[in-house]
Structure formats: structure tokens, C-alpha cells
Image (cartoon, helix red, strand yellow):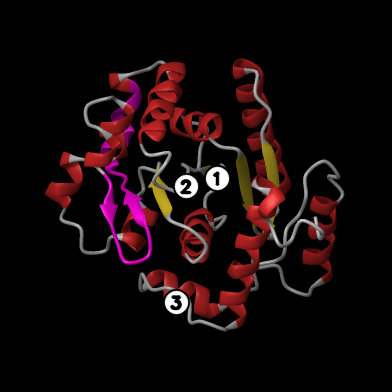
């Protein structure tokens, strides 16, 4: 089982959109579990648009993080992949358990319970440095950082890299990291910003996700991308690139990276 987090501490960076459509692409390659660890619940809304709020509050990712319920009792199944949903109650997580280490270990135990069931796990993380972010980083082999052409991009990336480095130090782990550039246009300003990202040699920059109204529209409608469109191919390639990073021995793209 390969665990991948999609992270950026800046809002509007396309985290949930990237996680949703990457999960769709990975699900075509193996059984996939989607974990929404962001209290905003955008990924939950995409995956489970008809989920009753009462049912959501009874069993969700917070229930698992606090050890109140088994992960298997909180996972919902869809036609494409399985989902561990989020809830606004995550805002109270640190009130019930302020110890990030215990949360990291609790979620690790939860994932171990379903390790044999899934080939891929995609975690959508909060847009701030919270315990949920630390928990996701700790339990992931790869952190994908979606970046958009904003003046705050480099600053936000550096803050996230600091958070990852701190987690690596505390737990004596080393994580794989990659940038996923999204919505970059042909303008000189956008190209210069993208080159700054690519200049960070120790972190690979994966293929661009194109600026596409179809991605925005399909995401808002909680729909998958239309097969064989440019947007569909972009996320399909991202899935291959992701697998090449987490499982290079079995990747068809290992000669490219």
C-alpha cells in the first residue's frame, strides 16, 4: 500500500481538486482509498455529494484519529474508490487530543488494519500547519505539492517544506516530495515562477496540470473528467509519475524520472 499526501498550506492551491482527480486516475490502476483530513471537506463533497450529515458526524476521519471507531467502520464505498470522509468537527481535534505524536501513531495503526485491501491511499490535507497535516506527512511516503501561479507560491512552498523537515526530524523519517504545477499560463511571469520551482533540484517538478475550465466545472459538479480529454490525460500522466516515485520498480515511467 502506497500512501500519498496532497499538501499546501496556502488556500486555493488546488489541493482537493488534485487529490480528487488523481484518485480517479489511480483507481484505474489499483484499489484506492481517499482520506479527507481537511475540516473544509471539499474532497468529501466531491466523493460523497449525497452523504447525510448525520451519518457523516457519526463516523469520519476524526472518529478514527481519536480511536473512537475502527477505520473499516468509517469508510464509505463508491464506484471508483473508497472514502474516509472529513467533518467540520475536525476543528475540535486538538481539544480532544493535543498530542500530535499520538495522532500520528493512531492513524498509522488504522492504516495497518486496511493495508492489504488497498494499493493506493490519497490524503487531502488542511491548508494550514495543523496536527492533521503532521499526521498525514508522517504516514505518507510521498508528499505532492500542488502549486499555482501566485505571488505567495514560493513562500507557501518554503513553509510547507519546513513543516515536512520538522516532521522528518522528529520521527527520523525521510519523505519523497514533488511539485505539481497547475494553471500556469504561457506568460513570462508564469514561466519565470515555474522555472524557480524547477530550480529546486532536490525536488522534482512533475508534468503540468493545464489551465482548464473543464477541470473547474467537473470538480464543482462532483464529476470525473471526461475520458481522453487534455485534462484527463494530464491526471492520467500524474498517476503514472506518482507511481514512478513511490514504486519505481513496477512503474512504466521509471526510465523518465
Q: Residue at left 47%, top 30%?
A: 135
Q: Give residue 221's position: percent from left, percent from top.
A: 36, 74
Q: Which residue is mark 2?
A: 121
Q: Residue furthest left?
A: 54
**Residue 79 within the segment the image draws in magenta:** yes
Residues at discs 2 and 1 in contact (Cβ within 8 Å): yes
Q: CA distance from mark 2 to mark 1?
A: 6 Å
**Residue 239 within the segment the image draws in magenta:** no
Give the vertical position of 42 relative to 173 (above or below): below
Q: Residue at left 54%, top 58%?
A: 14
Structural crowding at the residue carrying mark 2, measured as other residues with C-alpha within 10 Å and reported as few (<14), some (14–19) or many (≥20): many
Q: Which of the marked residues, 3 or 2, is nearer the chain's N terminus?
A: 2
Disc 2, SS: strand
Disc 3, SS: helix
Q: What stretch of residues is rendered in magenta? A: 75-94
Structural crowding at the residue carrying mark 1, measured as other residues with C-alpha within 10 Å and reported as few (<14), some (14–19) or many (≥20): many
Q: CA distance from mark 1 to mark 3?
A: 25 Å
Q: Which of the marked residues, 1 or 3, is nearer the chain's N terminus?
A: 1
Q: Residue at left 53%, top 79%?
A: 213
Q: Which residue is mark 3?
A: 217
The answer to which image quadrant residue 149 occupies is bottom right
The answer to which image quadrant residue 13 occupies is bottom right
In the picture, the disc for residue 4 is: 1
Q: Residue at left 78%, top 75%?
A: 186
Residues at discs 3 and 2 in contact (Cβ within 8 Å): no
Structural crowding at the residue carrying mark 3, measured as other residues with C-alpha within 10 Å and reported as few (<14), some (14–19) or many (≥20): few
Amino acid at each position: 500500500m502506497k500512501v500519498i499526501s496532497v499538501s499546501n498550506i496556502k488556500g486555493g492551491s488546488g489541493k482537493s481538486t488534485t487529490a480528487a482527480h488523481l484518485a480517479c486516475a489511480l483507481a484505474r490502476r489499483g484499489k484506492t482509498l481517499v482520506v479527507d483530513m481537511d475540516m473544509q471537506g471539499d474532497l468529501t463533497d466531491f466523493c460523497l455529494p449525497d452523504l447525510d450529515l448525520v451519518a457523516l458526524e457519526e463516523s469520519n476521519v476524526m472518529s478514527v484519529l481519536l480511536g473512537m471507531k475502527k477505520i473499516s467502520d468509517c469508510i464509505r464505498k463508491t464506484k471508483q474508490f473508497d472514502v474516509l470522509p472529513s467533518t467540520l468537527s475536525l476543528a475540535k481535534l486538538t481539544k480532544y487530543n493535543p498530542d500530535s505524536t499520538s495522532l500520528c501513531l493512531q492513524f498509522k495503526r488504522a492504516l495497518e488494519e486496511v493495508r492489504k485491501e488497498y494499493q493506493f491511499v490519497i490524503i487531502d490535507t488542511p491548508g494550514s500547519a495543523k496536527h492533521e497535516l503532521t499526521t498525514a506527512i508522517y504516514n505518507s511516503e510521498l508528499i505532492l505539492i500542488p502549486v499555482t501561479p501566485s505571488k505567495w507560491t514560493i513562500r507557501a512552498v518554503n513553509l510547507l517544506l519546513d513543516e515536512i523537515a520538522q516532521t522528518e526530524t522528529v520521527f527520523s523519517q525521510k519523505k519523497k516530495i514533488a511539485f505539481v504545477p497547475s494553471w500556469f499560463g504561457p506568460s513570462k511571469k508564469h514561466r519565470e515562477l515555474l522555472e524557480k520551482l524547477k530550480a529546486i533540484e532536490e525536488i522534482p517538478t512533475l508534468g503540468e496540470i493545464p489551465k482548464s475550465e473543464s477541470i473547474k466545472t467537473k470538480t464543482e459538479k462532483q464529476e470525473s473528467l471526461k475520458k481522453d480529454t487534455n485534462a484527463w490525460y494530464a491526471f492520467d500522466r500524474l498517476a503514472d509519475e506518482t507511481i514512478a516515485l513511490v514504486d519505481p520498480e513496477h512503474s512504466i515511467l521509471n526510465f523518465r524520472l
